Amino acid sequence: MARLFESGVTLRRARLALLALGSLFTVAGVTIAHSSRPIKSTKYGAIPGSPAPSVAAFSFTDQQGRLVDKHSLRGQVWIADFIYTTCTSACPLITSRFVALQRRLPDERLRFVSFSVDPERDTETALAAYAALWAPTEARWRLLRSNSSGLAPLFAGLQLTLNRAQGELMHTSRLFLVNAEGTLLASFDSADDAALDQLVKQARELLGAPASNETTSAVSGSGAALYTSLGCAGCHANAQLAPPLSGLAGSHVMLEHAGTVLADDTYLAESIAFPTAKQVAGYPNSMPNYGSLLSPQQLQSLVTYVRSFEPELAGPGPSAQTDPVCGMAVRVTPQTPSAEYHGVTRHFCSPACALRFKSDPARYLMGTAAASP
């Protein structure tokens, strides 16, 4: 359920946050880490009057060490994306929607393929850990450890580029639908809900599957099982990506557009079902809507499970600080985002909060002794 309780921010605002992180690449009106030459598109991303391109040959190993190549996927419809596991900007947004698609398209004949664009760090072990965090029960997902020689023709055939800037790998955020013959039929903006609805529709048509009203059969089980199945830990296990859930229930949550809200059952349920309703300060929105995938009973099970997350911190202490931007308790580790101001190092729940602080420290320290030189 990537990005629970951070909702309400517009995609434009999320993209501005990525721009500040130096990981944004703007192309043809699509502004989340996009490639410089996306496939020209009208309906479904197809090029009218042009032959559909064939995906270039590739041969990589997946998270279990199995060889996966274009030939092994022949005869199967598959959806592909490009990510890397250490990314804390665009990739969690992409993966959260990729995992949501897996829930919306449960057909066993379908395959999901993620190409890593960082083969040096994305070993089979790293890819397996990423899969276990996001979708541990999804057997159809192949996360591939690529190599530069194999990526080059693949990117060229898809009219994509890969660049590095300020430590970030800039790559496409589109999803690609490939038919059983290995022909690329369309590409879709992963940040566009309407485009993803079209992707679901076209994938079902390729499979000859009946249209679905996306009932709650897509997910099942207890609150803990639902939390795992929906990939919630993919973001909520990392405070840089999403608000921590420990101690959330019953607390007051600072919202992006000023004010706070009590995290009672109503708020928790609303944030799961309709993430655009409210946004936690310091976090962009990247969480898919789950209202159509969860029955009232399942939604309540998730709320009950979130209430079981006990506070990890009794209060700020030697290993904890309060984020001056959003007011959240932050456990300080070497990876915690930080900024120095007037000789004092402050820590933040996310890179977005750190960037906001750096843009105007006095604003967030107003009324405190630390605000004065």
Image (cartoon, rainbow, N blue to C red):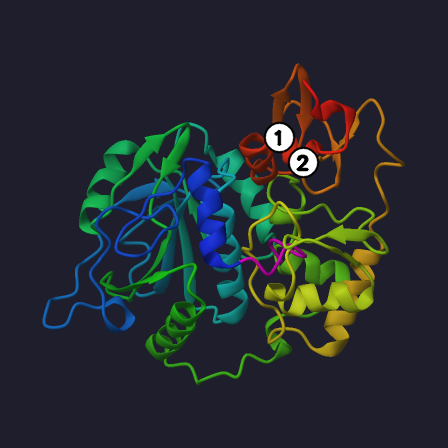
Tag 2's secondary structure?
helix
- Residue underneath mark 2: 364
Residue 100 drawn at (x, y percent)? 53, 63
Please name whichever residue, 139 or 239, is drawn nearer the observer in this view of the structure: 239
Residue 78 drawn at (x, y percent)? 36, 62
Q: Quadrant of residue 359?
A: top right
Tag 1's secondary structure?
helix
Question: Which labelled disc corresponds to residue 361?
Answer: 1
Residue 173 drawn at (x, y percent)? 37, 51
For the residues labelled 2 and 1, the Cα–Cα distance comes to: 6 Å
The reply to whether residue 177 is in sight is yes
Residue for point 27% across, 54% down = 71
Residue 23 drawn at (x, y percent)? 41, 38
Amino acid bearing label 2 = Tyr
For the residues labelled 2 and 1, say whether their Cβ atoms are less than 8 Å apart: yes
Q: Is residue 292 above or below residue 83?
A: below
Can you say which quadrant of the picture contains the C terminus? top right
Q: Is residue 47 above or below residue 286?
A: below
